[in-house]
Image: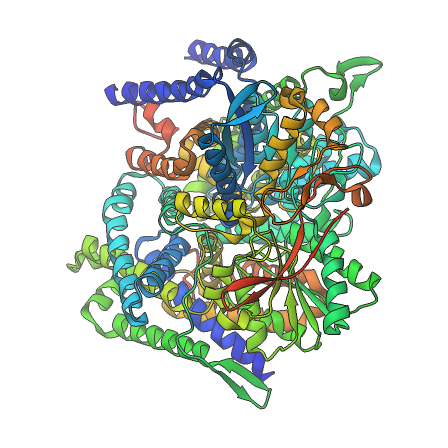
Amino acid sequence: MTQSRLLGVGAFLLGVFVLVPAFIHLTGRWDFYYTLTSVALLSVSAAGVWLTFYIGRINIGQGAYALLGGYVSAILMTQGGVNFWLTLPLAGLFCAAVSVLIGVPILRLRGVYFAMVTLVLTEVARLTALALPITNGAKGITSIPLPGELSIFGLTLIPDFATLENPKLAFYLMAAALMVLTYLVLWRIVNSRLGHLCRSLQQNEELSASIGVNTAMLRVLAYAISSFFGGLAGAIFVAISQSIYPSSFVVSDSVNFMLYCFLGGLGYVFGPMLGTLLLYFGWDLLSVAREYQLLIYSGTMIALMLILPNGVLSLFDRKGGSK
Amino acid sequence: MEQILANGLYLGAQYALIALGLTLIFSLMNVLNFAHGQMYVFGGFVTYTVVAQFGLPFIVGLLASAVTLAVMGALIERFLFRPVIRKSKRDESTMLLAAGIAFFLDAVILLLFGEKQRGVPKIVNGVFNWDMRLIMPYDRILIAALAVALIVSFILFMQYSRTGRAMRALAQDRMAAQLMGVDVDRYSMIGFAIGAMLAGLVGGLLVTITGVNLGMGGPTSVKAFLMIMIGGAGVISGAIAGGFILGMMESVGLTVLAAYGDITYLVIFITLMIFLAIRPQGLMGKPWG
Amino acid sequence: MKRRVFLATTGLTLALAFATNTAAWAENAKLKIGFVGVTSGPAAAWGISNQRSMETRAAWLNELGGVKIGDTTYDVEIVAFDDQKDPKRAIAGMEKMAQDGVHYVVGPNVDDGAAAVRPVAEQNGIIYFPYAFPKELYTPPASNAILGMVANYQSGPAIYKYLMDNKGVKKVAFVAANESDPLSQRDGGVEAAKALGLEVVSDSVTYQVDTTDFTPVLLPVIQTAPDLLVLSGVSPANAPQLIRSARELGYTGLISTETAQDATVLMEGAGELANGFISVGGASTPELASDAMKEFVDRYTKMFGEYNDESNTKVYALEYIIETLKANPAAIDNVEEFKKTIDTFSAPNPFMVGDAKLSYVGTTSFGQKRQVSVPLVVNEFKDGKFETLFVAQVD
């Protein structure tokens, strides 16, 4: 079992870091780099949403943290002159901190109530970005520099993106690495004591509280990790587009993150990754269908739901039980 | 002051009617229907087509909307939601289905009715003006009255008809209702059809005043969600209260906060979040809906 | 098990078919012009009118035997991408254009998208024509974006000045949706109005784009009794409702906007209450439209069932691209050549009567020529049609 799992992980890493770039070089489809970069980043964000699902909460507010993370990184870079690589963890941590403040009161809510409050949260984030002076309001922040050099003791670990011949590849590798790390962390969480406790929360919160699980603490912790992922993804998107506006992440992004999780399968750690790939990449490929793009896209979505209501990954579910 | 209250009441009446259909579907099937706004838009376009393109009277358009949407709702329940609910492990999975239907309706609306804003001519002309203290066009008064009439007849229907009673029983306890001999499948379908029909009716009513365009669907759904959250999810009286409260909040908020400019809606939304954090089940809802 | 394999293989085949299919067409003698904009969702009207006017014009040119650039005759092909008004998608769209070998792209339609695609366009040698107004897109060091229309900070002052001189406007109020584009336009408008010496009585009222009743929004604005109500960056969907609410509240002053509107939409949504509404249009009013413009409207109507007056301002970008390429054939795959031609380019304007010219402008606003010169036609709505109020030029 462990051997086959190791093999699977190896094949996955090989695919992401070797086969995909090789495929792109062979076919010359350079535009796939950006699309796949987006998929990787969005799936990082969706991983956070999945984690909140894991504690039994429907999270439609991840867009708010992506936006927040993006702004933190953008402001630190343009106004503080901070190196991008430092702003990245700071953006994540800032989001986690904010999510603790917001999470303590709202995580008491459940079901659709929690879902709706988080949905409102996305809109609140957008309106806040419009109203605050530090975000430059409606005019957004533009002309943000590309990620600079990352070096330790004079040793260059990551070169300045502006000097690279192919920043697309660099962004892809960065996003893919981040995705791999994120899912490693997620997988670790799920298969640890913490994951066990989270599952107990998903099934019956009162019961787990009654046997001494600190449910409040656990919920906030899971939500903070979730928001951390959202912030990271947002910050990298800002680095790619070199600009951020209040509308960079909106309600439809939040809804999409949730849909990625559903489509991949809520019971599977790698569900959101697959869901993101199918939905985001699918939309791009469907652009050949022109005015029927949305029709085919949504039709397929409905059909998938009818055939596989527990997510695409349930296809590989031999025993029929959730993981 | 009178003006602000009247605006709030008018907004509230239309909001409440939108929220009613959504809350009915939610109470029966525990489905958060993301496509509710699209159904509303679809209803508006049907009325527009009948009235403005075919030149038939407004009431025919309204009926056409109601029938079209009721049929659509019944079909969606029978062939989409029912099998998915039966097979899925977690209730929430229906949200993806609902979102897929919302996108699908968006695409259909774009292909059938085009991208432009549409509206039908006013059904009544003239403006009621009480000494400049209260100004209200007659068509708005008429639409608000119609909305209230619809709300009242819906409540009476739910309260006294056989179907209404069966649906209330279903909403209270699905299992118990089934044991008492209520045909769960049949009433779920009827409930969904009625919910969709209400959405279509509001669309038809409002096309005379605000018009309709393909982008209104998503935001309308979100607003309707807010209303049922304020009132309490799955409770009819809650939806009505939620609609009127949101209407009042907008009307009063916009006037009071006008001087502070861009933060009006920020304040409204934050107030909502705080309210829900303090009272998670809304005004009248069952906790943990 | 069988179903699994079946599903997996069909999925894979489909994906591969899509991936290879787009590459197979590359050899034809076609001139590909891109469009990246929003053609679905709430703002679909902007992008659709844009894409359709490009497709109408392209079909027309191809019917005439194509366009001759240098020694080669090309068929014009429009490559369109729907960005769903999402800046992240807009980047993907621009990447796709680069992939298809497209060097000239019309769009995106909004500020955030236009800013987000800038790095991609500059890296891949793409000139793009956004319908977004932020000045930093067009001022150096930025050099690949060309503003496809008249910006509000150019049209606004002209309109206010005209109304001050001719209608005695003294007090002005602004309303805008709480989104980036309209708010930026409002701020620009307020600044321009103050510079002209107008008294701004209200500039803080905003609304959500999904508002269904504008009476509460407009109530505090109307109470300040302005002579002119400016609907900054108003979308065609909101305009009729705003006009109607303002009139029904007893407002009798002027109403204007700096965006393009559609006459049918105004007529249906506000009826005669919209009479006197001032907006910016292209050259399709009967007094100004050339025969070519009239034929364009006919062809558009035949192709898509119904004309959209917003297209009047959107016929130009494609025309500019093709005419500039004709003037300098070397620019066909080299945007540096295109940029050189910009400074001297001039050609007759086919869509307007008289001897109007196509040329690049913008030196006053951006310090370099990064804007297409389109006539600033200010229209007044009257009984279902637009009438020309006055025409001005932007430098």
Residue farthest to the left?
A: B181
Placement of the N terminus of chain B among the 4 image quadrants: bottom right
Observer able to see residue A165:
yes
The residue at 61%/45% (across/down) is A64
Q: Examine the image and state in which quarter residue A186 appears.
A: top right
Q: Position of residue A44 (x, y in %)?
A: 56, 30
Count every numbered label the image shows and give the total.
0
Viewer-side residue, C297 vs B251: C297
Q: Is residue B271 left or right of residue A212?
A: right
- Is C144 left or right of A29, judged from the image as shown? right
Coloring applied to the structure: rainbow
Tell me if residue C52 comes above or below residue B129 in the rendering: above
x then y, percent, for residue C389: 65, 63
Q: Is C236 on the left or on the right of B48, as rendered? A: right
Q: Position of residue A116 (x, y in %)?
A: 50, 53
Nearest to the observer: residue C90 or residue B248: C90
Q: Find residue C136 and report its image quarter.
A: top right
For the C terminus of chain B, the quadrant is bottom left
Residue most extreme to the bottom: B131
* Residue B237 at x, y percent in the picture: 39, 70
Q: Quick check: can you spot residue B238? A: no
Q: Residue at image x 71%, y 23%?
A: C337
Q: Nearer the viewer, residue C168 or C69?
A: C69
